[in-house]
Image (cartoon, rainbow, N blue to C red):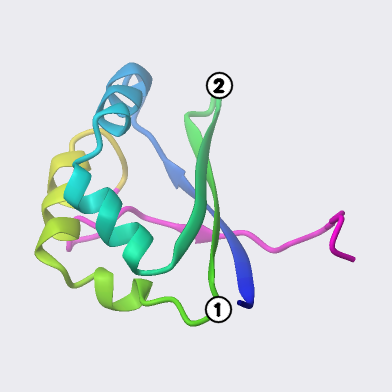
Amino acid sequence: MPTETVAFSMQLNPGCEAEYRRRHDTIWPELKAALLDAGVIDYRIFLEPGSNRLFAVLTRRADHGLDALRDSEGMRRWWAMMADIMQTNPDASPVETALAPMFVLSSED
């Protein structure tokens, strides 16, 4: 199954690090299932201390259905819940900046 990896950054509000972690530690089972069903294989979010910049690395099936997931009720509820602790767009989705790959080292090469 072909896969692809994408990365993007988001901005966490100052002082919200612990709350961001707490909310993700208790991610709703139905949202987790929806992400996996949509083709997520691996999803990791890292915090740069001091800047509150979040860096997400997401590996997904090449035939993923994540675009449709953006319109789901569960995702919109999650975004609404997270909107008070991070920078968001008018629809409450997080402001994301796509990151360009600069180097890849893989055992599959």
Image quarter of the N terminus: bottom right
| Crowd around label 1: few <14 · some 14–19 · many ≥20 (10 Å) | few
Residue 84 rendering spot, x and y as whole percentages: 18, 36
Residue 10 rendering spot, x and y as whole percentages: 44, 46
Residue 14 higher or lower than 106, as above or below: above
Q: Residue furthest front?
A: 1
Question: Residue at the location (52% across, 43% down)?
Answer: 44
Residue 87 position by quadrant: top left
Question: Residue at the location (49% across, 39% down)?
Answer: 54
| Crowd around label 2: few <14 · some 14–19 · many ≥20 (10 Å) | few
Question: Residue at the location (25% across, 33% down)?
Answer: 85
Q: Which residue is mark 2?
A: 49
Q: Which residues are magenta?
A: 88-109
Q: In front: 26, or 104?
A: 26
Q: Main secondary structure of the magenta part?
A: loop
Q: Secondary structure under badge 2? A: loop
Is 98 magenta? The answer is yes
Q: In front: 39, or 95?
A: 39
Left or right, residue 71 beside residue 40: left
Question: Residue at the location (54% across, 20% down)?
Answer: 50
Is 60 magenta? The answer is no
Q: Which residue is mark 1?
A: 62
Left or right, residue 33 beside residue 9: left
Q: Secondary structure under badge 1? A: loop
Residue 27 position by quadrant: top left
**Which amino acid, mark 1?**
Ala
**Which amino acid, mark 2?**
Pro
